Image (tube, helix red, strand yellow):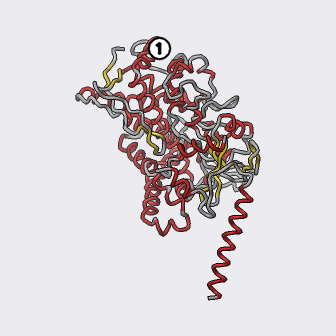
């Protein structure tokens, strides 16, 4: 009995001291809902939300109660959420260096991005600088011109599919599917430097989608990392199988390209993968290994396919829903481009309404409702609150873009709000943050120029060549669903008719 007494007493004392230490440690953190030792806000979150992943409405209520910055504890680790434009600017831009790192990757991310040696996941430091600088050289504006034939190749594939549907009498065109596939055609071409056949592109799309479409489902193994290998053995087998499939498909493509480069064979252009072969990692001087090469190529595809395809789908959905916007855009395009003329990058610069439509889509339907989590490089203070070193920090992207204090009638789709200074609007948020669909500060998405160009290019061509409607009695449903990105809950299936241009 004495042994049990001492055991229970010791455990109770440990729990008490741990709770006391946590209270002391968290005293100067941003305010938080009630916490339980070891479990943090877990029970409170489950009670407050029907869906554990649906943090947005919970954070919205916390903002009203606690203010601009709030804390949520998952276990003993604080996750800090910034909910206003001003606080986001102070953190991400004015204190950009401090808020520029990434938290240690969770277990599932480590499988697909080992060592975090990719642009988006690398901690702030020398490795990140090398990888980002290399990425920026590939997608700098002057280089984007060299990919124009890749864009046209992907566009021609979409138009062929649409015309086939029209000729066969199909009144519900799966435009979302066509746009997603076209983005894989384009990005695989730029990434690997090869114009792949349809089957190869579909295989690349399939192996990437096996990760994308299960991204949220796999998150469950990260909540209990100690037990997950036992409790979720079947899920872990699935995760490792997806990584195996990714390696089996992409590594031979990468090695074939590497041999082609070594042999001095002529290539159309310098592909992204070509730039990776000679990179030497700081401190070690080692070249990227096979796992890292596949991860970087996978990241390149992920960052430019499903995110851009989601944005394209939201643009098209709003153009179908608001026919006046579609016709106004069509009129602008026909004033800039003559009948039968290919739409080029230079034409897009003379289409302010097109740019406004795209900006309004980014504001109203950002591809992600949160930025990729940040980690502070050193303990810091913001708005009087302590932010511990390596604490996970996030920003409510959708909340900023729909804030009625900043945007008039924020839930309306109104491109005209960007016509006055749309060409000067700072998507990176350096001067001020009004919306940040691509993040802000030092870890802002490096592919903004390429993303905007590609979205504008495909939208301009889709509207110039086809009139988009829905069948009588049908409505466009703009309900959202969280996947790897924020997508349409009910995908758009619109009618298309060729325009006489």
Q: Quadrant of residue 478?
A: top left
Q: 121 above or below 475?
A: below
User: 346 and 7: which one is in front?
Assistant: 7
Label 1, residues with CA under 10 Å away: few <14, some 14-19, many ≥20: some
| Percent position of residue 79, x then y | 63, 51
Q: Is residue 139 left or right of residue 149?
A: right
Q: Nearer the viewer, residue 9 or 418?
A: 9
Percent x, y for residue 49?
50, 50
Picture mark count: 1
Q: Residue furthest bottom?
A: 1
**Image position, residue 189 (x, y; %):** 47, 38
The residue under label 1 is 332
x then y, percent, for residue 129 = 68, 44
> Which residue is at a point 46% across and 29% down the rendered structure image?
149
- Locate the N terminus by quadrant: bottom right
Name the outermost residue toward the left: 168
Q: Residue at x 61, y 61 (%)?
A: 36
Instruction: Using the rendered image of the protein, determine whether residue 266 is visible from the camera's viewpoint.
Output: no
Task: Quadrant for the C terminus, please.
Answer: top left
């Amino acid at each position: 009995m004495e042994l049990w007494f001492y055991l229970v007493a010791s455990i109770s004392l440990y729990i008490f001291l741990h709770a006391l230490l946590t209270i002391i440690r968290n005293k100067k953190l941003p305010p938080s809902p009630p916490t339980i030792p070891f479990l943090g806000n877990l029970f409170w979150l489950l009670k407050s939300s029907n869906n554990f992943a649906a943090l947005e409405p919970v954070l919205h209520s916390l903002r009203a109660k606690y203010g601009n910055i709030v804390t949520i504890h998952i276990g003993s680790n604080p996750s800090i959420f910034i909910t206003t434009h001003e606080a986001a600017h102070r953190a991400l831009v004015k204190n950009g260096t401090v808020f520029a790192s990434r938290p240690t990757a969770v277990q599932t991310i480590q499988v697909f991005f080992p060592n975090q040696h990719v642009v988006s996941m690398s901690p702030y430091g020398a490795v990140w600088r090398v990888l980002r600088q290399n990425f920026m050289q590939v997608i700098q504006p002057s280089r984007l011109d060299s990919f124009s034939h890749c864009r046209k190749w992907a566009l021609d594939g979409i138009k062929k599919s649409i015309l086939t549907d029209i000729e066969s009498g199909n009144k519900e065109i799966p435009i979302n599917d066509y746009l997603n596939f076209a983005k894989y055609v384009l990005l695989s071409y730029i990434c690997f430097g090869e114009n792949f056949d349809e089957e190869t592109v579909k295989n690349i799309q399939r192996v990437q989608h096996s990760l994308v479409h299960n991204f949220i489902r796999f998150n469950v193994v990260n909540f209990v990392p100690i037990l997950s290998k036992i409790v979720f053995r079947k899920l872990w087998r699935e995760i490792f199988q997806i990584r195996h499939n990714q390696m089996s498909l992409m590594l031979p493509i990468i090695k074939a390209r590497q041999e082609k480069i070594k042999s001095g064979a002529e290539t159309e252009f310098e592909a992204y993968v070509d730039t990776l072969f000679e990179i030497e990692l700081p401190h070690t001087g080692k070249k990227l290994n096979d796992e890292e090469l596949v991860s970087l190529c996978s990241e390149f595809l992920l960052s430019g396919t499903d995110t851009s395809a989601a944005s394209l789908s939201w643009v098209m959905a709003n153009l179908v829903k608001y026919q006046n916007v579609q016709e106004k855009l069509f009129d602008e395009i026909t004033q800039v481009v003559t009948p039968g003329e290919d739409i080029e990058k230079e034409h897009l610069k003379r289409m302010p309404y097109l740019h406004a439509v795209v900006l309004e889509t980014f504001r109203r339907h950002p591809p992600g409702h949160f930025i990729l989590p940040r980690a502070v490089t050193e303990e810091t203070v913001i708005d009087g609150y302590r932010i511990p070193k390596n604490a996970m920090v996030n920003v409510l992207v959708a909340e900023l873009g729909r804030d009625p204090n900043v945007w008039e009638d924020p839930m309306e789709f109104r491109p005209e709000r960007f016509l006055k200074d749309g060409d000067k609007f700072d998507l990176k948020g350096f001067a001020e943050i009004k919306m940040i669909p691509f993040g802000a500060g030092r870890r802002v998405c490096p592919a903004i120029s390429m993303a905007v160009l590609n979205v504008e290019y495909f939208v301009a061509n889709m509207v110039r060549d086809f009139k988009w409607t829905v069948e009588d009695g049908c409505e466009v449903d703009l309900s959202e669903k969280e996947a790897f990105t924020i997508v349409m809950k009910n995908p758009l299936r619109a009618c298309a008719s060729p325009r006489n241009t």
